[in-house]
Image: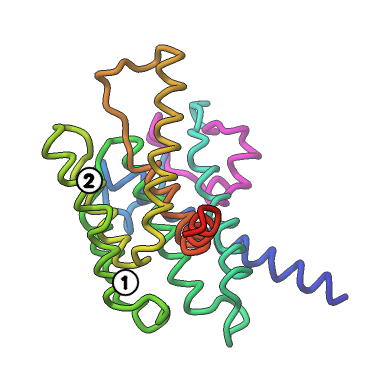
């Protein structure tokens, strides 16, 4: 019986995360178009038909409809389904890793991590679609960093200040020397995230970001989908590194230093 109740609790957490990230799909779609993200009924981008309640059930509607609009048959991007599932997995993971707190749902530390993961998700997909990272997301991360001063006391103020510059400043210098090496949004993302996560997490974050971005570029070059002169959106790869560093950053750096006996 206890196992069933625990399973139902985790299912509820998954559904909650799915619903939150379902709203983020609206942000990802509407913000670059200049549309209001709060007001306005959801509609099919193909035929403009307003979607009914049965078509707005996160994850479920996409599967039931076979990834198509019921009106015009237009294929719906799998991005929506991916983001929603990612939200459910993220919320469950945060509840396991950071604990449930006194509420029995999610601790305050877990909320900081979950909100940060949500911001990274929006940044990654908008940058992937448009090659733009909006400054408002950097501001949100900085505000999370201010809240984290009390919730993550293991990261001192000096730790956070160093984190804000240890990666972003070299990126800025490289961007000035090699035009187009990094975008301004990428640099500001690393600066804001360094303030939130501290300098120890930023080392593995940039390593994972560059490694994953490099592998993607090699793969695309091999398939002749891009050329050496093409620019790619680097934000999604930085987001992957930052998401991993948010959870395991300090541990990854400690492991690396231990391996090399430093």
Q: Is residue 21 magenta?
A: no
Looking at the rendering, which quadrant does residue 163 occupy? bottom left
**Which residue is depicted at the point 42% across and 79% down?**
154
Question: Quick one: label 2, few (<14), some, or many (20+) residues within 10 Å?
Answer: many
Predominant SS along the magenta part = loop
Q: Which residue is mark 2?
A: 171
Q: CA distance from mark 1 to mark 2?
A: 19 Å
Residue 36 versus residue 51: which sits nearer the camera? 36
In x, y percent, where is residue 71? 51, 31
Q: Earlier in the sequence, mark 1 or mark 2?
A: 1
**Does 50 appear above or below 18?**
above
Q: Is residue 60 magenta?
A: yes
Colouring rule applied to residues = rainbow
Left-right relation of 149 to 72: left
Question: Quick one: label 1, few (<14), some, or many (20+) residues within 10 Å?
Answer: some
Left-right relation of 135 to 89: left
**Which residue is depicted at the point 32% across and 60% down?**
193
**Does 129 appear above or below 193?**
above
Name the disc covering residue 159, or none: 1
**Does 183 appear above or below 202?**
above
Q: Where the N terminus falls, by quadrant?
A: bottom right
Magenta region: 44-70
């Amino acid at each position: 019986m206890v196992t069933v109740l625990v399973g139902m609790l985790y299912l509820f957490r998954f559904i909650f995360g799915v619903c939150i990230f379902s709203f983020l799909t609206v942000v990802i779609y509407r913000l670059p178009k200049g549309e209001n993200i709060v007001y306005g009924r959801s509609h099919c981008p193909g035929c403009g038909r307003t979607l009914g309640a049965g078509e707005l059930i996160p994850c479920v509607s996409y599967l039931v409809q076979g990834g198509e609009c019921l009106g015009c048959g237009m294929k719906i991007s799998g991005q929506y389904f991916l983001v929603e599932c990612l939200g459910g997995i993220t919320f469950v993971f945060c509840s396991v890793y950071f604990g449930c707190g006194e509420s029995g749902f999610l601790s305050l530390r877990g909320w900081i991590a979950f909100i940060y993961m949500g911001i990274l998700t929006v940044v990654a997909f908008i940058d992937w679609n448009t090659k733009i990272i909006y400054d408002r997301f950097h501001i949100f991360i900085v505000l999370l960093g201010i809240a984290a001063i009390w919730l993550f006391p293991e990261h001192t103020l000096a730790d956070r200040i160093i984190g804000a510059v240890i990666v972003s400043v070299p990126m800025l210098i490289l961007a000035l020397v090699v035009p187009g090496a990094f975008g301004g949004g990428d640099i500001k993302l690393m600066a804001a995230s360094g303030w939130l996560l501290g300098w120890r997490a930023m080392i593995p974050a940039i390593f994972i970001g560059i490694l994953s971005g490099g592998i993607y570029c090699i793969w695309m070059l091999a398939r002749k989908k891009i050329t050496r002169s093409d620019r790619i959106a680097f934000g999604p790869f930085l987001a992957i590194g930052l998401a991993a560093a948010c959870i395991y950053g300090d541990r990854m750096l400690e492991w690396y230093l231990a391996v090399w006996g430093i």
